[in-house]
Image (cartoon, rainbow, N blue to C red):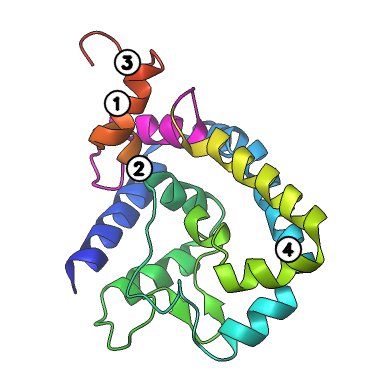
Amino acid sequence: MNDYQKEQLDALQMVRQGLAQIRVDEKEGLIEKARDYMQFRKTVDQFLHCHFNEVCTKNCYESRTSACCSKDGIITFFADTVINALYSTPKQLDCLDSVLKRTNEGHRCIYLGDGGCLWVVRPVVCTMFLCDRAMNTVFTERPEAKLQWERLRRQEKTFKWPDRPVLFDALEKVFIGMGYRSTLMHLNFSPGLLNVKKKAGLLSKSG
């Protein structure tokens, strides 16, 4: 197990333990917090299926040359792990646990299985990744799609960019409040993002 896998496994186990500790109504409250985000993800999936499904399937998935999935691992937020756990079965989470404990002998993402991504709700960085080749191919022919994509990218920031109260920050704080600490809690421990929050007036004088 390399450092990346350990970091991912630690976050997954923290989330599973934390969700097991809270009441059913508290868990339902987290699902409700994520409702707008999940609607956003549904809109993004529909957009990608409509405009990029054929291009990306042919050029990347079938040829196994995806610029994202060919990497050993992908960037995730702690909130990605929380949201995925909220919408996954124990068996699906057990699968992630097992994969992270194995040696990654290939040169592709540890989460990429024979049938595609093993996450139920993929990390947002994966969902919002489009290579230049794909964008040039689609947006040259469909300029209206480019405008729609730019709107989606702006909407993405409203969930994870902490220049205002955002979902990803709120989910981290739930687990911080339970005593958990993860290196994937970027919105509360990354100096760069803490500076964004400070400039936005979202940190207390002692924070």
Which of the marked residues, 4 or 2, is nearer the chain's N terminus? 2
Q: Is the residue 162 above or below the residue 38 in the image?
A: above
Among all residues in the image, which is located at the extreme front?
140
Give the left or right position of residue 21, taking residue 47 as reference.
Answer: left
Residue range in magenta is 163-185
Disc on res. 18: 2
What percent of the width, then of the height, locates residue 196? Answer: 36, 27
Q: Nearer the viewer, mark 4 or mark 2?
A: 4
Which of the marked residues, 1 or 2, is nearer the chain's N terminus? 2
Which of the marked residues, 3 or 2, is nearer the chain's N terminus? 2
Q: Nearer the viewer, mark 3 or mark 1?
A: 1
The quadrant the N terminus occupies is: bottom left
Q: Nearer the viewer, residue 141 or 92?
A: 141
Which of the marked residues, 3 or 4, is nearer the chain's N terminus? 4
Task: Give the SS element for disc 1.
Answer: helix
Residue position marked by numbered label 1 in the rendering: 195
Task: Give the SS element for disc 2.
Answer: helix
Query: Residue visible at 30% across and 72% down?
Result: 100
Q: Are marks 3 and 4 in contact (CB under 8 Å)?
A: no
Q: Real-space Cα distance between discs 4 and 2?
A: 43 Å
Give the left or right position of residue 123, taking residue 101 as reference.
Answer: right
Residue position marked by numbered label 3 in the rendering: 203
Circle 2 residues within 10 Å: few <14, some 14–19, many ≥20: some
Residue 109 is at least partly visible in this image: yes
Q: Real-space Cα distance between discs 1 and 2?
A: 28 Å
Residue 183 among those drawn in magenta: yes
Residue 66 among those drawn in magenta: no
Task: Give the SS element for disc 3.
Answer: loop
